[in-house]
Image (cartoon, rainbow, N blue to C red):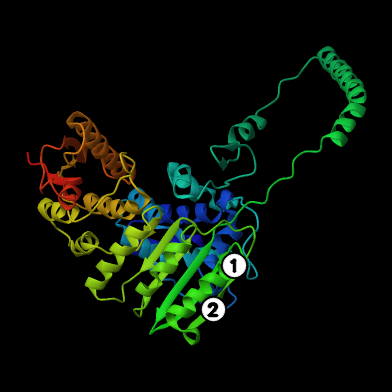
Amino acid sequence: MFENIIEQASVLVGDRKKASQLVGMLVALIFNEKRGGPGGFVQAFRNANLGHVVASWLGREANCSISSNQLESVLGPALIGSMASRLALTQSTTLEATAKILPEVVGALAHNGQMSHGSIVPEPLRGLVDGIGDFVGTLGQWGWGGVAAGTAAVAGGIRVVDRTVQTHSQAPRKRTSSWLIWLLLLAAFIGALLLYLGYSRQQPASAQAETRAPGPAVAAEQVEPRFQIENVNGKVAVNGQLASEPERVRLMDALRATFGAGNVSGDITVDTKTAPANWMDKLIALLPQLKDSGIKLGFDGDKLQIDTSALPEDQRFALSQKLRAEFAGLQISGLWDKAMAAFSMLKAGFTSDDLVKALNLSTIYFETGSSKITADSMETLVKAAEAIKAAPTGTRIEIGGHTDNSGDAALNMTVSQQRADAVKAKLVELGVAAGTLDARGFGQDKPIADNATEEGRAQNRRIEFSALKD
């Protein structure tokens, strides 16, 4: 079965080894122990309102396909970017291939319309997981934890079969002299007797201690608040989960007030184990901006997924900018700005100058006074890494950090270098060869606008890319 799936994947990615690795990555994600194994994997699609899709893969209904956007909303762009970089494929190719073969993989693992509840990779598939190298160890970066690959020791978040022990157990055993055997048996008996006597003496005291001081109750694990909205010709469908009834009523009232009671369908459930929705106030204030048909938006904890592809490009730019400004602390995917448009327009054979023009349309944000890149900049960097990796052989890019003239010049130089280094480190983490990049801080020495105005200072605080020529 999986040989056929790998053959299908080979046609999609153009290489059998990469196809085998891609299938191995999907097996690793499905048997991801920290996300609940196969059951948790299926639940992730249900949480994204794709339960009917995954049910068809399990054989319960007519087979349904999944779009690249839908798949990215479940797995996240950062994880897809990591997969693409390790396979040396573009992110779009990785998404399209995964969307095509994932239903086949899930179907092959399903039995009587259900997935296994365990998180142990079946023996015939362990070779596929072994073939993806250290990819499993990086899953925690994207919130996907580890994967169980066997039944023995746990190491690095991955359960592995201790093949060394198995091999040694098959080796011929040396004969032990009879006196040594009796000596070992006598030592074992004495040890067991001492343990029993010690346990007997301690048992009453232990029981009393447990009676007097019961252990603290284990707190129920919180789940993330969720909310999705889709506008189709002014009629909005919503679903989600919040922590309290007052929260639910407040949001539903705001939706009806904005779109009209007769134009709102769906509902939001309440579960007291749900964490507070810290984005609620900003979401309610933003609802009037979501009146255009075709807008899709979804929150899942501190992640925001948007789809503005149905809008004219200028409206896509404006709404993306608004969402990024309002929800800067969240990890946002689906943003559409001039850089994203330029990246999508790069065709095979593009030059280093074409690449730099696209890169310099992007905006990378940092936490105030820090070199820490904000979560909403991740998707931009994923796309930038994908473009750099597709550049002609020999392309080298300088990452220049710049500041405005506020504060101490020496400190500005340090901050600019740290920010350039941070961008380089993130691009390398996303698969760009370190030798392709050079990070350099320029401080306040190269302004492009007037530092006398706030707008000018904002333009001067930037990351600027340049093509290095030999």
To which quarter of the image does residue 425 belong? Answer: top left
From the viewer's perspective, tell me whether residue 417 is left or right of residue 187: left
Q: What's the residue at 51%, 52% (across, down)?
A: 28
Amino acid type, residue under disc 1 in the picture: Pro
From the viewer's perspective, tell me whether residue 270 is left or right of residue 97: right
Q: Mark 2 or mark 1, which is nearer to you?
A: 1
Callout count:
2
Rendered location of residue 111, percent (x, y): 63, 66
From the viewer's perspective, tell me whether residue 217 is left or right of residue 188: left
Where is mark 2, residue-wise?
266
Mark 1 neighbour density, 10 Å: few (under 14) some (14–19) many (20 or more): few
Amino acid type, residue under disc 2 in the picture: Gly
Where is mark 1, residue-wise?
246
Image quadrant where one finds the C terminus? top left
Q: Relative to 328, is 315 above or below?
A: below
Mark 2 neighbour density, 10 Å: few (under 14) some (14–19) many (20 or more): few
Q: Hey, which residue is sitting farthest front in the picture?
A: 452
Label 2–label 1 contact, CB within 8 A: no
Would you say residue 264 is visible in this rendering?
yes
Rendered location of residue 340, percent (x, y): 24, 61
Would you say residue 72 is visible in this rendering?
no
Q: Hey, which residue is sitting farthest bottom in the picture?
A: 262
56 or 49, which lies in front?
49
Q: Relative to 453, is 369 above or below?
A: above
Rendered location of residue 12, percent (x, y): 34, 64
From the viewer's perspective, tell me whether residue 457 is left or right of residue 277: left
Q: Earlier in the sequence, mark 2 or mark 1?
A: 1
Element type where label 2 sits in the image: strand
Q: Hey, which residue is sitting farthest left in the picture?
A: 470
Residue 385 marker: none
